[in-house]
Amino acid sequence: MPRERKKLLLRLDPAVYDALARWAGDELRSTNAQIEFLLRKALKEAGRMPRDAGRMRRPGRPPKPRPAEEGAPRDEE
């Protein structure tokens, strides 16, 4: 089972946030994903990335859960 992700309140200068949001948009990431990407990159470059750190989430929506069995009924749309 995946670990619960930590929530963090971050205060940024509005100009820094705007630049970060534009950069995230250019790379097709959310601002939150861009912050995590940059923090992970900095940790790795500094040799401080924890060995047990999970992978970053893939872009886009999480996949829908699959039915438990092959013949399980699916929800009607």
Image: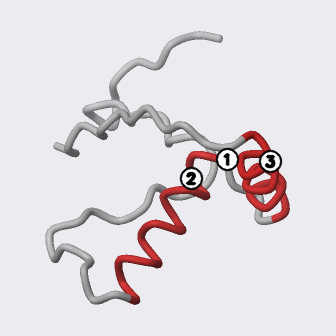
Foreground of the two, 77 or 42: 42
Residue 41: % across, % down: 47, 78
Which dot marks residue 33?
Answer: 2
51 over 22 or under it: above or below? below
Residue drawn at the location 73% of the way across and 52% of the way down: 16
Foreground of the two, 46 or 76: 46
Name the residue tied to disc 3: 15
State yes or no: discs 1 and 2 in contact (Cβ < 8 Å). Answer: yes
Which dot marks residue 30?
Answer: 1
Give the quarter of the figure containing the C terminus: top right
**Viewed as shown, does residue 4 lie left or right of 35?**
left
Residue 25: % across, % down: 81, 54
Give the structural element (helix, strand or loop) at label 3.
helix
Colour approach in the figure: secondary structure
Residue 12: % across, % down: 61, 42
14 over 50 or under it: above or below? above
Q: Residues within 10 Å of mark 3 (few under 14, many from 20)?
A: few
Q: What residue type is labelled 1?
A: Ser
